Amino acid sequence: DQQVKQNSPSLSVQEGRISILNCDYTNSMFDYFLWYKKYPAEGPTFLISISSIKDKNEDGRFTVFLNKSAKHLSLHIVPSQPGDSAVYFCAASVPSNTDKLIFGTGTRLQVFP
Amino acid sequence: DTAVSQTPKYLVTQMGNDKSIKCEQNLGHDTMYWYKQDSKKFLKIMFSYNNKELIINETVPNRFSPKSPDKAHLNLHINSLELGDSAVYFCASSQEWRPFSYEQYFGPGTRLTVT
């Protein structure tokens, strides 16, 4: 049962434009959402997070938006740079005795000049 | 200095063999994890340890046995390897268990291929 879904396996954006990566989830108990970024031959690295009590969190060029009623979150990158080309994983956490992160399958972002 | 390191980076072996993957973190973190990324790109938690104690065991076959000799190391031993074990295995660490650390630091991964 895939609780976190990234339906777009890839996205191609021109340098300087906005990149919008989307993520949908099914579990309304998730309390925290995160984005991780992964370059080839490296492990994922934490990028940005948002608590379920907020609807927006911004960090430099990266902004995450959360729409709880739609069970949807998105990552906006403005402006996009070639170095942003990577796979982006959406992840969520549900509070329990055994906290864990549940990851989506990732979206490959390519930023071209 | 590599924060979370794994060895080996690549592992090719035959069905039925036993193999180990080692993980070390030099961040002083209390919690370590093993994740598996399968061919469909799902990244799933397998185990987590906090201060050498097992916290999460996610319905993983008992052919997989994690061992944490100290809080800086978490090794993964796999017995009787099967074709379906082929995947990329990531080790990760986080600062503490409570409160739950959402920011986890991942190693570069070990690509295991079982033939």
Image (cartoon, coloured by chain):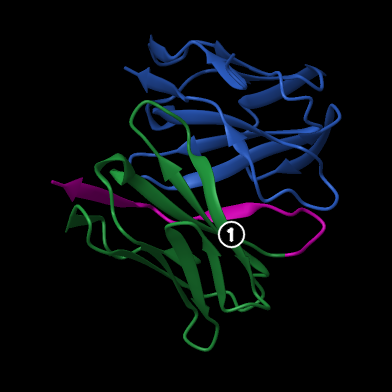
Chain colours: A green, B blue
The residue located at (76%, 19%) in the rendering is B72
Q: Identify the residue at horizontal 81%, vertical 22% (top origin).
A: B71
Give residue A7's position: percent from left, percent from top. 31, 65
Query: Is residue A2 visible from the viewing direction of this image?
Result: no
Q: Is residue A103 magenta?
A: yes
Q: Nearer the viewer, residue B45 or B62?
A: B45
Residue B48 in picture, x, y percent from top left = 72, 37
Q: Left or right: A35 with respect to A87?
A: right
The chain carrying label 1 is A
- For this view, does B90 lie left or right of residue A20? right
Give the labeled residue for mark 1: A49
Report the amino acid beneath label 1.
Ser
On screen, residue A69 versus residue A31, left or right, reads left
Residue situated in front as seen by the camera: A88 or A26: A88
Asked if A69 appears above or below B62 in the picture, the reply is: below
**What range of the chain is rendered magenta?**
A95-113
